[in-house]
Amino acid sequence: MLILKGISGIFIQSIVLREIFSNFFGNELFFCLVISFYLSGGAMGSFILSKSRNWQKDYIFFTILEIFILPIFIYFLRISTNILQAYYFSNIKFLILSFFLSFSSGFFEGCRFILLSFIYRYEKSSGKVYGLEGIGFLIGGFLFYLLLFFKKDIFFLLFFSFLLNISTIFYFRKNFAFIFGLFILSLFPFSNKIEFKTVEKKYKVFNLIEIRETFFNKLTILKKENQYILLSNGFQEWSTQPDYFSIKNIVYFSLAFCKDLKKVGIYGNPEILEEIKKYKVPEIYFFEIDKEKFKFIKEYQLKSGSKNIYFYDNLTRFLKENKIKFDVFIITSSLPMTMRENYFLTEDFFREIKDFTETISIVLPGTYDYLGEILLNLHSSIYKTGKKYFVNELLVFTYPMIIIFSNSELKLKKMLLTDKEFFNESYLNFVTDENKKSKYLEKILNTPSHINTISNQFSLYTSIAFYFSQFSQKTGKILIKFFSFLYKLKDFLPIIFLLIFLILLLPSFSPYSTIIFTNGFSSFTFETIFIYLFQIYFGFIYGFISGIIGIFMAGLSSGSLISILRIHSKKTLFYSEILHFLFYAFSFLLILNGNLPIYLIFISGFLTGWEFGIISFLVKKKSIIETTGKLYSIDLIGALFSALLLPILFIPIFGILGCILLLVFLKFSNLFKIYFY
């Protein structure tokens, strides 16, 4: 039963994550926000129901209640925003519904987990309970990935998870489960229609043409009169009626300083493709991780066909395999709202791309006359980062602003002009004025900012602050000051690590509770960091997130089940913590050198499950259910602590890599506490 519960649990968790992400621009940092809601519900549910007196009836009740409530929350979540509201984080109604959807799903899963644990109430350790659910998570993680590939609508996956839930009731009520299962089966043929109708309600003033769930995005094509619009995760990516003058500026000034014009690379908005074709560029390379977008671009965006345009989904692999050198590489996404987008503004990317392009052109948000404090921080970070790898730079103060980096001399080629009336002499002199450049550079260089790296994603946090400022300047200013303060704390990392170490040595809690709490915190932090890095390098957070969780749960399951095979002592736990400490130290060194082996996730899960089983054996309680409920709740609270603080506190202070180093210190402090206990 617990295996089936684990399969349905990972399905529901993945569905909730995807559903809420699709309205948060696909921002990975909101992964923690959503999971924190989910974990708080799970901790509460498992704790409250651990004292159930009629566990079989309670299990049936919460299983059926979940089946009715979750689709209703998803429906209201979708209609709570529309195209006019999709760009604002101030939609309180959406945030409240997101909380209830995530919290309630976590609550139901926590209730069902602890109630099914009653089946194993005569076991000596909770390891078996933890392990069996882990097996289900493993199977479910890869099954979700497989079904998403073949059947790309959320309601089909939701109905499938409900069918699994119903199958667990067969253990208690066969006739009732059979009848209710037939009802769920009857909904499968209508899943696609339900999916389309609920999304259609969201975009009332537009015609919904197509929706597609991919491994990377939720893509939506809308139409109004003759205009087609593509939304990726609720965010407008392109339109067939863009700002034509800004497109003209981006293309001309990006191309006008190149010695040759044979190969152009593009990452970002495809709206500039049509304009580039006017310059008779022989080879145009467009890079986008989501292949499904290529079909939409060709069908709805390119009016004159895709001749001479080559589409590739993996830029890093393309550079390594083809060894092509671009005359210019254009980046139009300079206000990153995801870690994946931010990667293309990091020094890690600049270090790689400088060997494959003569010039790089970056479209900056804002204009010379309208740069507030937050955008100055962003501009400063981009400039300082790019300047590390390119000798020359040129600024074009047009709409939008453009910064061009190059390792060769930058000279304007007026012979390229196709519209001499628009790009007249006075206009060219005005937007490339050297006095403006001097004043601008003085301004951004005196603005406090940090180099943007994969580990320290300063541009991403600045972009988030800017988006909040769109509906409240006060909120935006508070956020940028808060993030700037956190980044300043990097100078005091040794002191911060020492304080954390000393706090964990305080005798407020038993070492067993401390270890379970820190295991929940550490395993969630490590898993989340791994998902973040996986997303940055491969862009798989939507498709493979269930797979990564499944691999972690496979390790958790293995560790939990193996832990029940022998009698344990405090000495066993001490040696186990040494292994945990060495594991995180080894992982830090591997990831520091750019390695991301998937087996690290498995080992992290194994050690967490192994220690859960050991401690559940060592803790003396009246019943296994009481032990399981308490330890499971503490474990979830540790994970909840990580989920709440990781994106808004720990990553800005420590950086992604520093967060793994933090786990090393946590395990080191646990060793001290066990030794002297």
Image (cartoon, grey):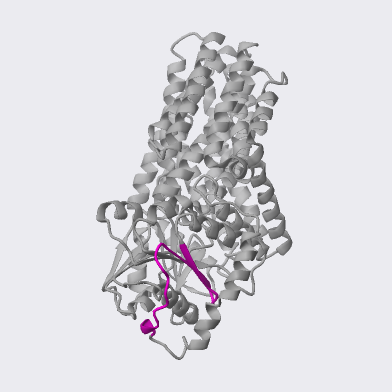
The count of marks equals 0
Residue 83 x/y as whole percent: 55, 69
In the image, what residue occupies the spot 29% across and 76% down?
305
Q: Is residue 331 above or below residue 13?
A: below
Q: Nearer the viewer, residue 543 or 253?
A: 253
Question: In which quarter of the view is residue 308 placed?
Answer: bottom left
- The answer to if 412 sits in the magenta stretch is yes
Residue 167 visible: no
- The answer to if 415 sits in the magenta stretch is yes
Residue 499 x/y as whole percent: 69, 29
Q: Nearer the viewer, residue 658 or 218?
A: 658
Residue 71 visible: yes
> Which quadrant is home to the C terminus?
top right
In the image, what residue occupies the spot 62% across and 60% down?
445
Residue 392 x/y as whole percent: 46, 64
Q: Is residue 545 above or below residue 604?
A: below
Question: In which quarter of the view is residue 376 placed?
Answer: bottom right
Q: Is residue 152 above or below residue 515?
A: below
Residue stretch rendered in magenta on the structure? 392-417
280 vs 77, left or right, is left
> Which quadrant is home to the N terminus?
top left
Q: Nearer the viewer, residue 645 or 410?
A: 410
In the image, what residue occupies the spot 31% across and 64% down?
311
Residue 473 x/y as whole percent: 71, 64
Q: Nearer the viewer, residue 607 or 328?
A: 328
